[in-house]
């Protein structure tokens, strides 16, 4: 395996152009979704029901679609995903008077996203393996964060401009157009790579789960999933806490989205310095827990400040665990390994949004931070217990040693 900067750059650019486009229309959608969901469903609590069905759909369909990526290739899976997303966006636009239509749209959107789980990372790994080069895990993670940040900023501006000029509902038409254009790009410019998975789906996932256990990666899987789900739920409900009168203050909604994009943009640079200092790294991995506990007590600009600190710490923690995870998995199981991590993440996400819905029926929106602090603390303990149990088992003397 060789390192060729030109080939590596070409692979990363070709793969990340649609990743950027998808991130942009997701940001445009995310800009308006909180206000749209609260308006369409009738309350901030019920808005979480749409997110619950989205994450439940992710959980149900994650494994089969992850196998499709490994078995039949990334290009067809991504095109299928984008077409399904277009249908879901259409249902959001034309089915606003019906709760059932909106929930079906969320299920379809979740199904579409599962076709993309780990897809870009898998395409990079497989394409580089077939070209005889290698893309470092650290470089992949930096590109992921760069694309996420850039698309978040551009998409937020697109969503704001569209909402300002054409109204809140028109964002869905923008998302449909961007999804179809991206599908055309992938069809025209992505190579159809030979798949690596040959076994049956059950055998494939058994082998993959065994490989994750052998490499002691389940702790990282749980840590990635915990950070992702808690921070995603916090970001989804942050607008309800930090932005009063959602429909009447699009500038503050834009500020919240741009803040997220800027934090994501600079998180890789911060993370590099933190990773070089173990004491700082350990502090950052746990920092978002006390910040979540402080947030319900803050208001005004201090609440925005603590929310920013929470996002920075969550992103640094995600990069740390994801980097270790990518380094340890082979290209031949990459789609399924990332899919298994996604399955855990989606199960936790569905649970988190269901609890958010129940919680918001009984408390003020700003008290939602207490729930997320409790979930983060509870979920963070599980990998520690797993590591402690593994160490204990390893310390038991065998008959040969005694």
Image: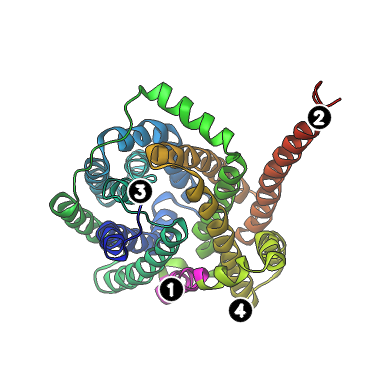
Q: Are marks 2 and 1 in contact (CB under 8 Å)?
A: no
Q: Residue at x 25, y 48 (%)?
A: 82
Say which mark, if any, is on residue 396: 2
Q: As rendered, which of 284 and 183 lies closer to the eye? A: 284
In the displayed image of the protein, which residue is found farthest to the left?
Answer: 188
Instruction: Give the mark toward the camera: 1 or 4.
Output: 1
Say which mark, if any, is on residue 125: 3
Quarter of the picture containing the C terminus is top right
The x and y percentages for residue 54 are 42, 43
Say which mark, if any, is on residue 301: 4
Callout 4 secondary element: helix
Q: Residue at x 21, y 41 (%)?
A: 76
User: Alpha-carbon distance for marks 3 and 4?
Assistant: 43 Å
Give the mark nearer the N terminus: 3 vs 2: 3
- Quarter location, residue 392: top right
Give the mark nearer the N terminus: 3 vs 4: 3
Give the mark nearer the N terminus: 2 vs 1: 1
Residue denoted by label 1: 258
The x and y percentages for residue 227 are 58, 53
């Amino acid at each position: 395996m060789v390192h060729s900067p030109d080939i590596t750059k070409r692979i990363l650019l070709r793969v990340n152009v649609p990743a950027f486009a998808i991130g942009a229309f997701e940001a445009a959608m995310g800009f308006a979704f909180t206000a749209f969901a609260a308006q369409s469903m009738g309350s901030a609590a019920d808005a979480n029901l749409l997110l619950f069905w989205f994450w439940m759909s992710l959980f149900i369909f994650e494994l089969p679609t992850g196998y499709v990526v490994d078995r039949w290739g990334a290009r067809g899976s991504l095109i299928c995903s984008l077409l399904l997303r277009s249908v879901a966006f259409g249902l959001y636009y034309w089915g606003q008077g019906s709760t059932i239509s909106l929930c079906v749209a969320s299920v379809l959107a979740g199904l579409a996203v599962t076709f993309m789980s780990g897809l870009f990372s898998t395409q990079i790994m497989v394409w580089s393996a077939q070209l005889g080069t290698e893309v470092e895990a650290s470089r992949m993670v930096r590109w992921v964060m760069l694309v996420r940040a850039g698309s978040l900023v551009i998409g937020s501006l697109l969503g704001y401009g569209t909402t300002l000029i054409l109204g809140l509902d028109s964002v869905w038409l923008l998302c449909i157009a961007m999804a179809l254009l991206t599908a055309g790009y992938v069809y025209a410019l992505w190579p159809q790579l030979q798949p690596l998975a040959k076994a049956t789906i059950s055998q494939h996932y058994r082998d993959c789960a065994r490989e994750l256990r052998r490499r002691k990666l389940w702790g990282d899987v749980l840590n990635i999933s915990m950070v992702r789900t808690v921070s995603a739920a916090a970001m989804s409900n942050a607008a309800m806490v930090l932005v009063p009168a959602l429909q009447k203050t699009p500038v503050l909604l834009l500020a919240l989205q741009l803040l997220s994009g800027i934090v994501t943009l600079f998180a890789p640079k911060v993370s590099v310095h933190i990773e070089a200092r173990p004491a700082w790294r350990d502090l950052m991995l746990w920092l978002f827990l006390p910040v979540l506990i402080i947030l319900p007590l803050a208001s005004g600009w201090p609440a925005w400040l603590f929310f920013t600190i929470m996002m920075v710490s969550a992103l640094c923690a995600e990069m740390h665990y994801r980097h270790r995870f990518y380094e340890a998995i082979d290209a031949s199981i990459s789609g399924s390994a990332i899919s298994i991590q996604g399955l855990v993440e989606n199960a936790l996400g569905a649970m988190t949004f269901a609890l958010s819905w129940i919680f918001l029926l009984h408390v003020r929106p700003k008290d939602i931070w207490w729930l997320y602090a409790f979930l983060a603390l509870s979920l963070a303990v599980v990998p520690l217990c797993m590591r402690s149990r593994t160490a204990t088992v390893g310390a038991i003397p065998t008959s040969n040693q005694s």
